[in-house]
Amino acid sequence: MYKIALSLFLFLCAGQLTAQVYPKEGSRLYYRIIGFSSPVMPTAVSYKFEVAAGNYTNDPDFEKKIIISRVGQDNKVIAEVPAFGAQYTWRVTCTSKSGSKVMTALFHFSTRISPDVDDAATRLRVIKPATKYKDAYVFLDCTHTLYDMKGKPVWFMPGSDEHNQSVIPRDLKITPFGSVTFITGDQPFEISYSGKLLWHYKGNRPNQIDSFHHEFTHLQSGNYMGMVYGHKYDLLPEFKGKTARNAADSAKYYSDTKYTKIVEYDTDNHLLWQWSTLDYRNNCDLAIMTTEELVGWDHDLHDNSVFFDEKHKVVYLSFRNINRIIKISYPDGNVLNTYGPLYQPGKTVWENEFFCHQHSCRVSENGNLYLFNNNVCGMPPQPRIIVLEQPGAGKNELKKLWEFTCPVLLGDTAWMADGAFKSGGNVLELPDHSFFVSMSVPYANAFIVGRDKKIVWSALPEKYDAVNKKWGQPLELYRASIITTRKQLETLIWNSEKG
């Protein structure tokens, strides 16, 4: 009976492990933190995963270069290989209750390389090492890359090693379902950690416009919410200087009103809900604005952030160019409140005591509004993070609860030209109520700050200037996001093996 059981164990272990392993034989990976797995063997009491640096075809050579060795009762393990642009060999040793061992064949994979993760070309220089969130990971859109808190790249955007580097993803972030969403080329995508395409926008074009912008989110409900641009062209009787945007022929001209629709789609690309800023503009205080006044913003109020509070069924929309945030009831679409100045005829400066050219507005669990304030109207115009108490029903006066002036790095650590345009930036509240902040153009640094206003981690993404032989900042860090725990990363990794 023992011999029969041992023979069956050897057959199952050798055969199934060879047929069902991950990463698959010959894989070329976009990441260094890897989920190694084998089938569960009923008679096994332990699994030993070994990884060697290099490509080997025989066990003696392999065993001389082993860099990772993990033994456990689980049939899967997560391990970090040291480098991108390298080859690796690995195997699993399966041990039965009797102590018999069976080794699989040698498997092979490689990690890809990209300028984004080449430490001679691009780096995330940690200025203040993490004292909290040491196991967190940070997505930066300017480098298409995920970093650990020591500034080491661990994952980069699939295809960015082969495609046009000028196409920068926007709003790169993890979802509640262990996947990654982003916008690139004005289109939204959802992918797995391994780069498998899980969802992308396919149709139901609202008003024949499908240019997504700024922010795209996989909601807790399983649906997707984002913003798409639209254009309304109005015929002008004659040419009137700057009011003419597009010439249809030699005699007729059109004014271009740029607007946005907030849209919600399900996984089958069915349009479930939409809300138009054009309808809002035509029915609020802005309706009486003259054409000349609108020209000051290129007919664009520049809505740049949308946040859906799914628990309370409320959507928040930010307009940068008029320093305004509105609160919208879902799904009826009624505007519940307006935060910011109302239109006053003949007044070209839209004053707001709390924020100016804000970017990224969100709501905390306790209902407070918080945002990244570019503070363009301030003196000095230094970005700030602001937490605001929302007023009760029928009121529109916010109350400032907390404010933090973001550090501006100067000298050899950053650049900021006088009068440089300040754009982008975002802020995310973390589980302990501290904030993860991306400062965007022209500062480009990211940091975590506690409610005691002490920075507990900060870093600066830089690219090497080969001509001047020195490090300098990348052109644009627009938005950044954070994976707060190792557990979230592991969920992302194991979900990539599904299907």
Image (spheres, helix red, strand yellow):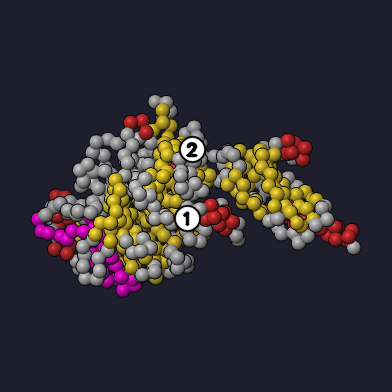
Measured along the vertical axis of the image, is residue 96 above or below residue 59?
below
Relative placement, left or right, of 326 versus 74 is: left
Disc 1 versus disc 2: distance between alpha carbons?
23 Å
Q: Residue drawn at (41%, 45%), measured in percent from left and top?
A: 456
Query: Is 27 part of what is drawn in magenta?
Result: no
Q: What percent of the width, then of the height, locates residue 117?
A: 50, 39
Q: Residue drawn at (40%, 58%), measured in percent from left and top?
A: 216
Query: Is 331 part of what is drawn in magenta?
Result: yes
Q: Point out the tag, 1 or 2, that comes first from the N-terminus.
A: 2
Q: What percent of the width, then of the height, locates residue 83?
A: 58, 38
Determine which residue is flagged by label 2.
115
Measured along the vertical axis of the image, is residue 242 above or below residue 314?
above
The answer to whether residue 403 of the structure is visible from this angle is: yes
Q: Are marks 1 and 2 in contact (CB under 8 Å)?
A: no
Determine which residue is flagged by label 1.
174
- In which quadrant will I find the C terminus? bottom right
Disc ID at residue 432: none
At mark 2, the secondary structure is: loop
Tag 1: amino acid:
Ile
Nearer the observer: mark 1 or 2; the answer is 1
**Highlighted magenta segment, given as a residue range:** 323-346
